[in-house]
Image (cartoon, rainbow, N blue to C red):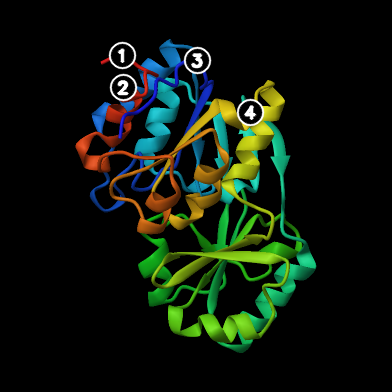
Amino acid sequence: MTVPNYRKQIKAVFFDIDETLFVKNKVHFPESARLAIQKLQANGILVGIATGRARCSFPAKINEIVEQEGIRTFVTTNGQFAVHNDEVIEKHPIPTEKVQRLVDFFELHNIAYAFVSNDKIRVSEITPMLKHALDPITTDYQVDKTYYQQNDVYQVLAFYAEDKDELVAQAHILDDLKTVRWHENSVDIFDAEGSKARGIAAIARHLGFSMENVMAFGDGLNDIEMLSLVGVGVAMGNGHDTLKALANHVTDHIEEDGVYNFLVKSGLIEK
């Protein structure tokens, strides 16, 4: 399929982190992605990060890129926290009573869980299942079961396999909340209206442009709303089939310069 020239339409490009900008299991950031970011900024196009991660759990390599390239626009915890130039544009913590409902259920069923704020991750206990899922993301966490009582929580991570999905669903603890499975042993839990798209929309309103002026790249199920609601949604070649089916475009694999190649094809940067 021929890719249109989007240069006049697009004012901002948002990137997911894991398997879009960063190969997690290889701790690798393609140099072509750095070049793409530099060229976008040189062309006056805003570069933002939109991730399920909290700001405190960005990989060291991404933090390095953020610092070196001066990226200051972040949509984190699946859209629950949106920041531009160190200003919090919008935030959506989970009400404490809803967190309490989750905690009571997980304690009853011996399910480990984690509280995610913008700057800290606190866990209920350290189990093999938790470590298997969370350690590739971050090892900077501590045990504190009461963290939610005095601090805003933007996302809860629950560490259970798919065979417990039905048990959780039938308990109705997720009413007014949504889950996205991001690992065979874990799900993200956050506000039912939450998504990366909501956070991006808040940034766009703040800066005076519309979602039609946004391009976004992603690979996973938590990118569905983002790719559906921006002007141009681009799925990575290594992305989930469900995401690729609804994206406006599918680019190459992350390790085959997918980000750079599509930005050139779409006219946002020059080769």
Q: Is residue 119 visible?
A: no
Q: CA distance from mark 4 to mark 2?
A: 30 Å
- 83 or 236: which is nearer to us? 236
Label 4 neighbourhood size at 10 Å, few (<14), some (14-19), many (20+)?
A: few
Image position of 55 (left or right of 133): right
**Residue type beneath disc 3:** Lys
Relative to 30, residue 27 above or below: below
Give the image quarter of residue 38: top left
Q: Are marks 2 and 1 in contact (CB under 8 Å)?
A: yes
Relative to 191, residue 244 above or below: above
**Residue type beneath disc 4:** Asp
**Residue 124 at x, y = what percent?**
57, 72
Q: Earlier in the sequence, mark 4 or mark 1?
A: 4
Q: Earlier in the sequence, mark 4 or mark 2?
A: 4
- Say which residue label 1 marks: 270
Give the image quarter of residue 108: bottom right
Residue at horizontal 49 percent and vertical 18 percent from the top? 45
Label 2 neighbourhood size at 10 Å, few (<14), some (14-19), many (20+)?
A: some
Q: Earlier in the sequence, mark 3 or mark 4?
A: 3
Label 1 neighbourhood size at 10 Å, few (<14), some (14-19), many (20+)?
A: few
Q: Which mark is residue 264?
A: 2
Image position of 143 (left or right of 267): right
- 6 or 41: which is nearer to us? 6
Q: CA distance from mark 4 to mark 1?
A: 30 Å
Residue at horizontal 43 percent and vertical 11 percent from the top? 43
- Say which residue label 3 marks: 8
Q: Which mark is residue 133?
A: none
